[in-house]
Image (cartoon, rainbow, N blue to C red):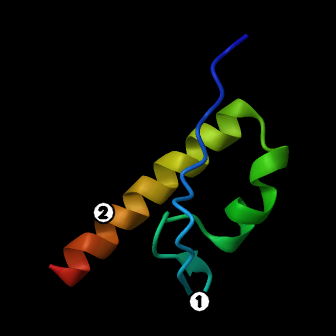
Amino acid sequence: MAKDIENPCIAVCQLSGDLCISCGRNKEDIRKWKRMKRPEKMAAVQRATARLKSLQKKNA
């Protein structure tokens, strides 16, 4: 069986509008995480990573 995708949640939820600024996921990704299949989780993690990088650049 393929390895599970690790949940990017770091248990420090800080929502700013529709986005958690701790893990980078939006509310929809957070809500659907447990029901997502592996490819969907991979895509969600990639989007979250890109969002976090964007936030870091804005705050730099």
Going by the picture, which residue comes out furthest to the bottom?
Answer: 17
Going by the picture, which residue comes out furthest to the right?
Answer: 35
Q: Secondary structure at mark 1?
A: loop
Residue 57: where, in percent of width, then height?
Answer: 21, 73
Does 17 sit left or right of 32 as displayed? left
Dots 1, 2 in contact, CB < 8 A: no
Residue at (67%, 15%) from the top-left corner?
A: 2
Going by the picture, which residue comes out furthest to the top?
Answer: 1
Residue at (58%, 39%) from the top-left corner?
A: 6
Q: Which residue, given by chain and number where applicable, does mark 2 sit on?
A: 53
Give the answer, above or below, for where 38 lies relative to 46.
Answer: above
Give the answer, above or below, for where 48 lies relative to 18.
Answer: above
Q: Please tell me which of labels 1 and 2 falls first in the chain.
A: 1
Q: Which residue, given by chain and number where applicable, does mark 1 sit on?
A: 17
The C terminus - image quarter: bottom left
Q: Secondary structure at mark 2?
A: helix
Residue density around tag 2, few if under 14, some if 14–19, many if 20 or more, within 10 Å: few
Does 8 sit left or right of 51 as displayed? right
Q: How far apart are the alpha carbons under marks 1 and 2?
A: 18 Å
Going by the picture, which residue comes out furthest to the front?
Answer: 11
Residue at (57%, 75%) from the top-left corner?
A: 13
Determine which quarter of the picture holds residue 51: bottom left
Residue 55: where, in percent of width, then height?
Answer: 32, 74
Residue density around tag 1, few if under 14, some if 14–19, many if 20 or more, within 10 Å: few
Residue 34: where, in percent of width, then height?
Answer: 80, 48
Amino acid type, callout 1 = Gly
